[in-house]
């Protein structure tokens, strides 16, 4: 069955209830940036309220969520062609990963792509990021398992998102909350999850961690230093999308 022939009924018959924890990486600059523009916490709060009023409204289905969880449902896709399971006209999708490493690979890849599309830049200096976890549960399809794994080449295409976007639209119609799939950006192929429904979240953000991300034209480096230990990940990209979202 091709992606275009997966009907909502067929997808619903393959869906199973699943639950788990997801990690997501986000830039941690926002509040620090607004603080630099004002002289007091009171002025910062006022500026934050003004900025909030200029943003798109949060969809009603996501209104109960913490802003870190609601943000992907609030804004249009960052890129004109959409994202892996979201066309330019689809509702929002929250992307997360089962492991910290995979979440770092996913965001790191897109920062690297930004650098590669900016000829005047040789590198991106270390920038603070927050990694956080959240818990999810709901009806799920797993593209790594039968019968979907027979079409793995469609679901893991580095740049052609159309088959996945078609599948995502049909999954929404079937009332499916989540799609699990193999990361294309993590060379180890870790598990990623596309959360289609804001109702899938069963917790707020948890286990927040502070990391720094630095990017050159040949590698992406994540670093986390704490009192007890240091850890990091490095991903090497050369000439195009890495082998192995």
Image (cartoon, helix red, strand yellow):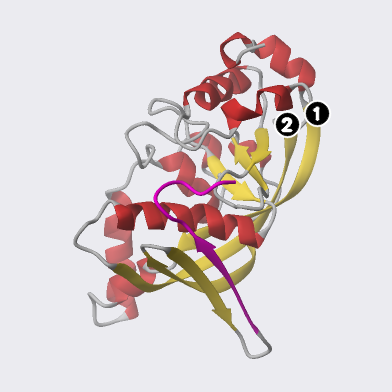
Q: Residue at x 62, y 55 (%)?
A: 102
Q: Is residue 13 above or below residue 93?
A: above
Write down the residue under mark 2: 140
Q: Which residue is at the front of the view, 201 or 77?
A: 77
Q: Which residue is at the front of the view, 75 or 148?
A: 148
Drawn side of residue 88 relative to residue 242, left or right: left
CB-based contact (under 8 Å), mark 2 and mark 1: yes
Does residue 24 show up? no
Residue 79 found in image quarter: top left
The quarter in which the C terminus is drawn is top right
Q: Is residue 58 above or below residue 123?
A: above
Percent coordinates x, y for residue 64 in the rendering? 57, 46
Number of marks: 2
Q: Residues within 10 Å of mark 1 (few under 14, many from 20)?
A: some
* Residue positioned most to the left: 120
Under circle 2, the secondary element is strand
Instruction: Decide whether residue 242 is among the magenta residues.
Output: yes
Residue 91 is marked as: none
Q: Residue at x 46, y 56 (%)?
A: 237
Write down the residue under mark 1: 16
Drawn side of residue 224 relative to residue 124, left or right: right
Drawn side of residue 59 relative to residue 56, left or right: right
Residue 66 found in image quarter: bottom right
Q: Residue at x 55, y 46 (%)?
A: 243
- Rounded to the nearest whole Å, what is the CA distance between mark 2 and mark 1? 5 Å
Percent coordinates x, y for residue 6 in the rendering? 64, 13
Magenta part of the chain: 230-244
* Residue positioned most to the bottom: 227
């Amino acid at each position: 069955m091709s992606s275009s022939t997966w009907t909502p009924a067929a997808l619903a018959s393959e869906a199973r209830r699943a639950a788990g924890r997801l990690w997501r990486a986000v830039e941690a600059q926002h509040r620090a940036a607004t603080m630099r523009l004002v002289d007091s916490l009171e002025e910062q709060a006022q500026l934050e309220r003004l900025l909030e009023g200029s943003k798109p409204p949060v969809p009603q289905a996501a209104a109960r969520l913490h802003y870190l969880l609601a943000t992907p449902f609030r804004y249009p896709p960052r890129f004109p062609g959409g994202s892996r399971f979201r066309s330019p006209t689809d509702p929002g999708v929250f992307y997360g990963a089962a492991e910290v490493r995979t979440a770092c690979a996913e965001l790191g890849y897109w920062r690297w792509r930004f650098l590669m599309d900016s000829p005047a830049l040789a590198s991106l200096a270390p920038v603070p990021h927050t990694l956080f976890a959240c818990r999810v549960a709901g009806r799920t399809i797993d593209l790594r398992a039968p019968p979907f794994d027979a079409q793995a080449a469609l679901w893991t295409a580095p740049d052609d998102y159309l088959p996945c976007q078609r599948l995502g639209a049909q999954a929404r119609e079937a009332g499916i909350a989540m799609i699990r799939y193999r990361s294309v950006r993590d060379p180890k192929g870790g598990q990623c999850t596309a959360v289609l429904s804001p109702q899938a979240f069963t917790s707020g953000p948890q286990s927040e961690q502070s990391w720094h991300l630095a990017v050159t034209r040949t590698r992406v480096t994540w670093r986390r230093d704490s009192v007890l230990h240091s850890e990091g990940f490095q991903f090497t990209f050369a000439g195009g999308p890495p082998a192995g979202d």
